[in-house]
Amino acid sequence: MDSIKCASQFVEAYNSGDWDRLKESFTADAVYDEVGTRRRLQGPDEILRANQGWKQAFPDSKGSITGAFADDGDVMLEITWEGTHTGPLESPQGLIPPSGKHFEVRACQVVKVEQDKITEDRHYFDMVSLLDQLGVAPG
């Protein structure tokens, strides 16, 4: 499998709520660095729980890959995430109750792939922009 397809499995599995596929796309010692929230997670179980939390807060959320570039096992995905905030959202500042508001945020994932599995995923997105669209940005 090519490295872009391998890295894209994460987004595709998240979109469909295919948690087994999401978990299987990572190596046992994979690192997921969610820069916007300052969470650094290790291993498929922690990565899975974090993504299930996003899906709980935004059940209709999905990512659209708008660009991709690969150099050997290093992949860059440009993604637009969107959804509606209808569930509780865990944040670094505590639980944010559902706002009913829609969001759209552009993001970038820098992914390292080895033997058709993700070993590292650095996910960059603007958390302040997300919170602003939900009406809860710090003022």
Image: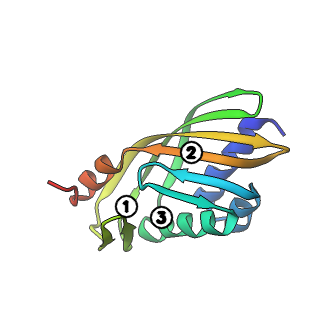
Which quadrant of the structure image shows residue 43? Answer: bottom right
Residue at horizontal 29 percent and vertical 49 percent from the top: 128
Circle 3/circle 2 CB separation < 8 Å: no
Report x, y in % for residue 46: 61, 67
Name the one closer to the observer, 11 or 131: 131
Q: Is residue 27 left or right of residue 124?
A: right
Circle 1/circle 2 CB separation < 8 Å: no
The residue labelled by disc 2 is 122
Q: CA distance from mark 3 to mark 2?
A: 16 Å
10 Å crowding of disc 3: few (<14), some (14-19), many (20+): some
Q: CA distance from mark 1 to mark 2?
A: 24 Å
The residue labelled by disc 1 is 84
Circle 3/circle 1 CB separation < 8 Å: no
Q: Secondary structure at mark 2?
A: strand
Report x, y in % for residue 122: 56, 45
The residue labelled by disc 3 is 54
Report x, y in % for residue 78: 53, 35
Q: Nearer the viewer, mark 1 or mark 2?
A: 2
Q: Quadrant of the N terminus?
A: top right
Name the one closer to the observer, 2 or 121: 121
Q: Nearer the viewer, mark 3 or mark 2?
A: 2
Residue at horizontal 43 percent and vertical 64 percent from the top: 58
Residue at horizontal 73 percent and vertical 48 percent from the top: 118
Report x, y in % for residue 91: 36, 65
Q: Coloring scheme of the render?
A: rainbow
Q: Is residue 117 left or right of residue 65?
A: right
